[in-house]
Amino acid sequence: MSTVPSLQAHTRGTPYTYQVFTITSEYVTINQSQALGIPIDRADLAQLTFVKAMDLAELQGQLIDEYLETDMLANHAMWTNFDAGTLATGTASTVAIDVDINNIFKIIGRMKTKISEANGDTLAARNGMAIIWLPTQFEILEEFAAAR
């Protein structure tokens, strides 16, 4: 939401007005579904020594997870980006963040600040926060964690 409704004083038995809110242009389009049904013949299952029903369920979960991750990253254009300008001054730019071992705390801290400024604390507490690191950046993050 780009505007958040607010509470209004009210006296019992009197009319009230609806609060208006506006939704931003960031969205997710759900227009297709994916299916991954695997029939399990009971006779075949009874004869299997290595593959069990839960192994097939785990495979389904893994394949669905991989699909969702790929699909989510393919929709990057709909995200709110966090870049070097946001990190330095709070104002967005198009310059990528140069991750080094000395600015990991600043990256995470600024992300939390931007979430809080957008009134996203409750949403972040419920759903968590995430950063997608490039492999080279993740290597620096691991080095940072190991040094602590």
Image (tube, rainbow, N blue to C red):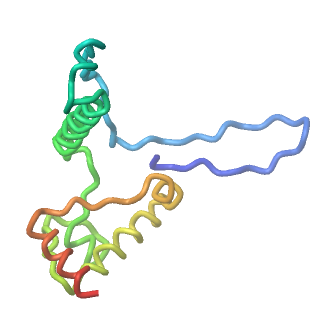
Q: Position of residue 62 (x, y in %)?
A: 23, 38
Q: Is residue 32 visible?
A: no
Q: Position of residue 52 (x, y in %)?
A: 27, 29
Q: Nearer the viewer, residue 32 or 10?
A: 32
Specify the farthest residue to the right.
13
Is 37 left, or right, of 128 in this rendering? left
Is 130 left, or right, of 71 in this rendering? right
* Above-or-below relation of 113 to 101: above
Query: Which corner quadrant holds the C terminus?
Result: bottom left
At 40% from the left and 69% from the top, the residue drawn is 112
Q: Nearer the viewer, residue 112 or 114?
A: 112
Quadrant for residue 75, please give it: top left
Q: Is residue 100 visible?
A: yes
Q: Nearer the viewer, residue 37 or 34?
A: 37
Quadrant for residue 17, please give it: top right
Q: Position of residue 132 (x, y in %)?
A: 22, 59
At 44% from the left and 41% from the top, the residue drawn is 23
